[in-house]
Amino acid sequence: MNFEPDGDLALFLDAIQHIAARHGTQWIPTRERHLYTHALERELEDSGFFGCILEEGLGRVAAAAMVYELSRLPVCAELAASALIRPLICPDLPRPLAVVWGDPARPTRFLPVARSVLRVHDGGVSVAELAEGDVASQESAFAYPMGVLRHPHDLAWTRMQAADAARVADLWRVGLAAEISGCLQSGLDAVVAHVTERRQFGRPLGSFQGIQHRLATAASAIQGARWLMLRAADTGAPLDASTAAGYAQGIATRISYDLHQFMGAMGLTLEHPLHRWTYRVKLLRSDLGGAEMQFRAVADTAWA
């Protein structure tokens, strides 16, 4: 499959990259665990980018590629649900949108900033709008705003009768793969810049063959995750979605460890954003049961 963008898709991605470049410069060192950007979300919503999945010539590939590009920023925003799920399932629901899987009382990313919540449970999909006081923020090491619903069973849930929970899960898997690969790619870029400049024993760290090999292996794995994600977005096949998510989650731990090892203590300091990408990945790698559950889904689909 040729994923080289052209036509409307190329123009769309060029616009996204310009937006990413503009918002990427707004990062500043801070003691906050996460840096959430409402400004980026407002720009995407006002410009209609969150609805790209419905546009002819754009569709799922454009939506997934947008999530990938913007996940590379040191600041975070609610992207995957708004770009891949909301336009197809609940387009009138106020965003940002938090997605809860199973138990509605479980800690969930983006709940403190969300205006609505989508819950996937018992083979169905339900949605509810949130009011002030419905969410309790939680302190977390993860670089996302985390929270819980105070009284989840008291919300005015609406069952989406036409929504297919399995289809929502496949779209979410594409989003997971896009976010993980985007975070890891930016982390890798930062480490490559560091080992190019940092000198040890009279030479740049990046000139040592052992470091070069491990970073090259990481680069190949991340690009593999990106291409699998784009294929899954293009085909819409459950097998491809599970493969993309499982592969991305499977490489996340090893690559994150390598990135921090080669960055050294700098990767955990306030003035460097590496930990903002790797701590997001730390949460995403366990979503939907982690790589093991994704590959079980692959097996179930391939040899049903």
Image (cartoon, helix red, strand yellow):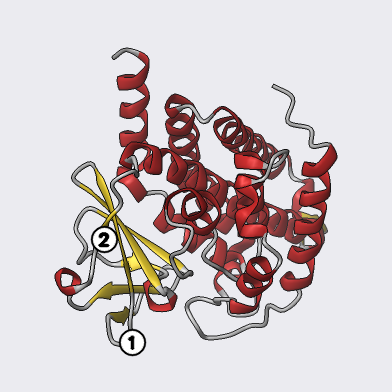
Q: Nearer the viewer, mark 1 or mark 2?
A: 2
The residue lying toward the viewer, choosing from 279 and 71, is 71
Drawn side of residue 284 relative to residue 10, left or right: left
Residue 17 placed where, x, y %? 78, 57
**Tag 1: amino acid:** Glu
Mark 1–mark 2 contact, CB under 8 Å? no
Which secondary structure lies at badge 2?
Answer: strand
Which secondary structure lies at badge 1?
Answer: loop
Q: Seen from this angle, which residue lies furthest top?
A: 303
Q: Is residue 201 visible?
A: no
Q: Is residue 295 above or below residue 82?
A: above
Q: Quadrant of residue 42?
A: bottom right
Q: Residues within 10 Å of mark 1 (few under 14, many from 20)?
A: few
User: What residue appears at the point 36 percent right and 34 percent down from the top-left corner?
Assistant: 294
Give the number of the disc on residue 158.
Answer: 2
Who comes first in sequence, dot 1 or dot 2? 1
Residue 8 placed where, x, y %? 80, 43
Q: Is residue 259 visible?
A: yes
Q: Is residue 47 above or below residue 232?
A: below
Q: Residues within 10 Å of mark 2 (few under 14, many from 20)?
A: few
Q: Quadrant of the N terminus?
A: top right
Drawn side of residue 217 relative to residue 192, left or right: left
User: What residue appears at the point 38 percent right and 69 percent down from the top-left corner?
Assistant: 116
Residue beneath label 1, please? 132
**Tag 2: amino acid:** Thr
Residue 94 placed where, x, y %? 46, 70
Q: Is residue 37 above or below residue 171?
A: below
Distance from Cα at disc 1 to Cα at disc 2: 19 Å
User: What residue appears at the point 67 percent right and 58 percent down from the top-left corner?
Assistant: 49
Q: Seen from this angle, which residue lies furthest left?
A: 153
Q: Is residue 150 above or below residue 70?
A: below
